[in-house]
Amino acid sequence: MTSLDRESYRRIYGPTTGDRIPLSDLGLTIEVEQDDTPYGDEVLGGCGKTWREGFYGRSGESDLDMLVSNVVLIDPVIGIRKTCIGIKDGRIVGIGRAGSPDVFEGVDLVVGPHTALVPGEGLIATAGAVDSHVHLAAPTLVEVGLSSGVTTIVGMGIGGVWDVGANPARNIHVLTESLRDIPVNVLLLARGSTTDRGAMESALASGAGGFKVHEDYGASPACVDACLGVAEQADVAVALHSDSLNEFGLLADTVDATAGRSVHAYHVEGGGGHPDLLEILNHDHILASSTTPTIPYARHTVAELFPMTMTVHRQHADFVSDVETTHSRVHEAGIQAENYLHHLGAISIVNSDSLGMGRMGETVRRTLQLAAHPALRAGEGEHADNETVLQFLAKITINPAIAHGIAGDVGSLQPGRLADIVLWKPAWFGAKPELVLKAGFVAWGATGQGNGSTRLSQPRLMGPFFGAMGGAPRRLAATFVAESAMSGRDLVDGPMYLPVRNARGLSRSSMVRNCAVPSVQVPTDGSLVQVNGRGISVPPLDHVPLGQAAFLA
Amino acid sequence: MHLTPQERDRLLVASAADLARRRLARGARLGATEAAALIIDEAHEWAWDGLKLDEVVRRAKEVLTRDQVLPGVPAMVSHLQVDALFPAGSFLVDIVNPIAVEADMVTSDRPPRVLNAGRPRREVTVLSEAPRTVRVTSHVDFSQVNPLLRIEGDLVEGWRLDIPAGSSVAWAPGETRVVTLVPWNARPEGGSDDVA
């Protein structure tokens, strides 16, 4: 029998069944559970390699546009698997074994004479991250997001203004035109802090794909009720920053106003919302998220929150009341419990809150830092840390996609989805991607120096590939809108529009690998939060992985 | 200055390397980005001074030790390439594993990966009458190889070499080799361990 020792096999074709892969400096290790390609028939591109005439088939309708070969796929729905990813017309059409059906039995992905190859051996593939809380305060955040693996933005605001929504119609139109040439999917949230249903309906017709209810504009029970009414009608999601002042009612009054209708509750540790907001986790119809500043809980987390909150929420040091209010919004015990509740699976989503109390480039890395938290992480299971990695990856891919009604298109590498694929070297996993494919075309990544003789020539810079240039993004990036808007006349021309679907009727059990509904109780005196009857105390981290080893600043 | 993009990029390396030197001077350990910059920066200047290319590579591997970088960094900068301007022009400096790590002494007692498992095999004797070396790779149909390879026996259409995918076998002029062939078609299951 012909054979190859395991290390040689791994170096040539990439890790396979049973191989373990350490992820950057996280201290987390994944194990490949399955390999779809029989040993001996691997796709390799290059001189004398298999990706040549004979290996691929004759041209036909089923030819792929692109193949990502021999990659280790990490997907919360699919699992951890060595495979090939087939792409046609911008979407993933299959994962599995690639080649020509003329010469191989059992080929899943038909490779034609002109199929493009992304050699994936030695690389990890994840779905592009979905950042479901982005204040579009400045365009600088776009390249930062792409350089960290974010390919979908749920955005609000229009930049340079005081607004938490994208609205009204003219502003939505101008913003949509400005965003259509960047290789990132966008779903704009309009301000839902109103009881004026007409204004909200107009925003949806003009290109918004959901709503944000925010206390800085009004989050009274009446607003919550009115906004959810419009959202139910249109099948879009509502994101909620509730009333931290208890001005219009207590948390229970806000929950009553939701009347069982699903809501995406932002920053549930309580920094933006009722001081006991964590108790909203007791309700199954609430989908909860954390923002980047409070995860993982670390040495300076509490110290930075006061000035950050004062700045972002336009508080004045001259008002004693503003200073008191802001101090009351920093919940150290809540943050500790929040970190724990992620491991418990009760908080299902992480997002950045970029430029509005959060960091655009840190959604992916902070989520993984929390996954690796030495005091909280579960021990290795049958397949190393696979379960932990899949649970935390779900929080930044499939779960925010489900919460906003876009999981049919993004958030997973399942067939049928847009081929928004992030490729990572394992040593850099979670820090800096190697390549970012947007709808099946390389759009971003580590570029070689332009005068280089090879593509590895230093300095390699995170930046645009051809999929980010000219008019390409209009074919590669979607703008998600309410389905009813697709047949209307109020959308501007240019972007690829896709409808939001199945954003209503969601519950915690809709969340992948993060569907716990614990009993949470927040004491009024700031003492430890009780989860299922136990006080939760978590020590702050002094050192985090995916930190100074990977970034020079 | 008429700076070109590649000159501008060289300055990025220089400023990142300066940051690395400042951190080293304070006794701090370097991250991957500034560690790579420091190595590349030194390589650029040795090239500028006209050292031989292999000498630049040799020195580049002595710029940093493992103790001067943070854990995980050697694996992150395992391969650096830079196009540097020597007095004789631009040339590629290829630096593999610039930060030395102890050799991985873990030897696995697990069995090797079995290739082309469960397939029929046949041996054929092949004589090369070609005046130059002929190389045949794993997935070429053996009925289509260079006609100066004289294959003993029946037609071999639909068969290929039983060697790892992407590797090859060479015939020197006049050489005879016995090689094993397997049929192209494989069972449809995915790769699995230890199936003989």
Image (tube, rainbow, N blue to C red):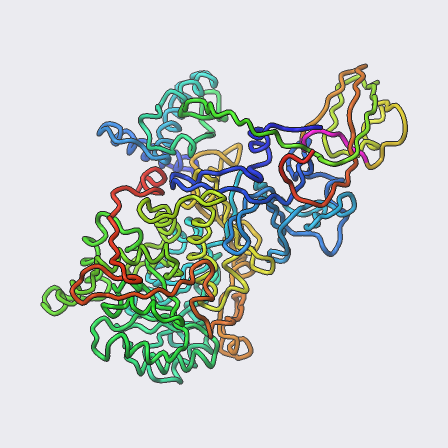
The magenta stretch is B159-166
**Residue placed farthest to the front in the image?**
A533
Looking at the picture, tell me which residue is in the foreground, A216 or B189: B189
Q: Does residue A308 appear in the picture of this structure?
A: no
Judge whether residue B163 is colored magenta. yes
Q: Quadrant of residue B5?
A: top left
Q: Is residue A419 left or right of residue A199?
A: right
Looking at the picture, tell me which residue is in the foreground, A338 or A483: A338
Looking at the picture, tell me which residue is in the foreground, A213 or A301: A301
The number of numbered discs placed on residues in the rendered structure image is 0
Which percent across, then down, holds residue A230? 42, 81
Question: In the rendered image, which quarter contains the C terminus of chain A?
Answer: top left
Judge whether residue B93 is colored magenta. no
The image shows residue B151, relative to residue B140, as above or below, that is above
The image shows residue A80, relative to residue A40, as above or below, that is below
Residue drawn at point x = 84 percent, y = 18 percent: B129
The image shows residue A512, relative to residue A549, as above or below, that is below
Which percent across, then down, holds residue A165? 35, 71
Which percent across, then down, holds residue B195? 67, 36
